[in-house]
């Protein structure tokens, strides 16, 4: 099994980073992060959509030869480890871009594939509809894998995948379907696969779920944990 040490970083620095990101993930975090960003004047930023961002939109080549738009943020250091950040069901919105910015600040080359191709939901029912229309296997095997390959072509360091809600489910699916993936961080979310499939996962994972949840139920999470593919499992009251 590949450990965090083989990612080119310590286990503590990797887990500290994903814990901090999870703790501040959500719509309320966006305003706090914006305030933090505006106070730092030493960043080389690119204007995107009329707002300050550290990164830029690029086109990533998928394994099938098609392209996927993605938000890329480079850190200040060369040959940095990579992190493919997967969106929630809202789409590639400002909050997810700011999350990628924070990974770059921590020393990672961060890349967020735009799974909805420019569409961003404004209401929960719209987001749920967009998620229901997403081809999960294609998103994992083509968009996410293409993003991973893009980062690996630019650095000899390892690349991890992490996501929130829908992105968490896709992180686990990618762990099953993307051979280039070195580690994963799932912040809730389970893919629609047979739980027995999780035993095939060989890379280290850190996963976060709630003790009370009618989507990722404790029973389903137990099936994942019992597959023994998890490096760390965190459950929190909700």
Image: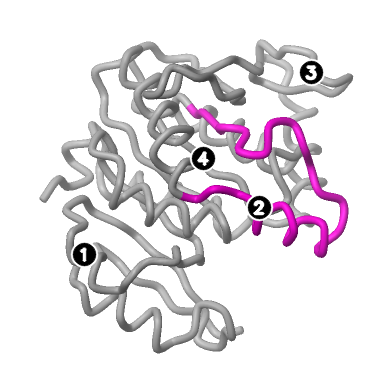
Asked if disc 1 and disc 3 are in contact, CB closer than 8 Å, the reply is no
The numbered disc on residue 85 is 4
Q: Earlier in the sequence, mark 1 or mark 4?
A: 4
Residue under pointer 2: 133
User: Where does residue 166 sit, x and y in percent of width and height?
Assistant: 57, 57
Task: Determine the secondary structure under disc 1.
Answer: loop
Task: Determine the secondary structure under disc 2.
Answer: loop
Q: Looking at the rendering, in which quadrant would you find the C terminus?
A: bottom right
Nearest-to-viewer mark from 2 and 4: 2
Distance (Cα) linking label 2 and label 4? 20 Å
Distance (Cα) linking label 2 and label 1? 29 Å
- Above/below status of 188 relative to 87: below
Q: Residue at x 73, y 17 (%)?
A: 41
Distance (Cα) linking label 1 and label 3? 39 Å
- Above/below status of 141 relative to 60: below
Distance (Cα) linking label 3 and label 2? 27 Å
Left or right? Give the position of 91 relative to 154: right
The range drawn in magenta is: 110-136
The numbered disc on residue 220 is none
User: Where does residue 171 sit, x and y in percent of width and height?
Assistant: 42, 51
Residue located farthest toward the left when viewing the structure as drawn: 1
């Amino acid at each position: 099994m590949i450990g965090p040490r083989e990612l080119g970083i310590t286990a503590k620095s990797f887990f500290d980073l994903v814990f901090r990101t999870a703790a501040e993930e959500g719509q309320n975090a966006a305003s706090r992060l914006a305030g933090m960003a505006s106070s730092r004047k030493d960043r080389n930023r690119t204007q995107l959509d009329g707002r300050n961002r550290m990164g830029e939109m690029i086109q990533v080549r998928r394994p099938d030869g098609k392209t996927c738009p993605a938000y890329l943020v480079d850190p200040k250091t060369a040959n940095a480890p990579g992190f493919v950040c997967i969106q929630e069901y809202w789409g590639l919105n400002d909050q997810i871009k700011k999350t990628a910015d924070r990974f770059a600040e921590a020393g990672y080359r961060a890349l967020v594939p735009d799974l909805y191709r420019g569409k961003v939901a404004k209401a929960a029912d719209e987001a749920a509809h967009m998620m229901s229309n997403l081809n999960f296997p294609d998103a994992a095997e083509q968009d996410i894998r293409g993003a991973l390959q893009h980062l690996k072509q630019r650095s000899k360091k390892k690349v991890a995948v992490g996501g929130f809600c829908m992105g968490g489910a896709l992180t686990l699916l990618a762990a099953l379907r993307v051979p280039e993936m070195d580690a994963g961080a799932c912040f809730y979310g389970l893919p629609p696969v047979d739980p027995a499939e999780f035993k095939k996962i060989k890379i280290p994972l850190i996963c976060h779920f709630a003790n009370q949840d009618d989507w990722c139920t404790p029973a389903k999470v137990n099936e994942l944990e019992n597959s023994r593919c998890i490096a760390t499992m965190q459950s929190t009251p909700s």
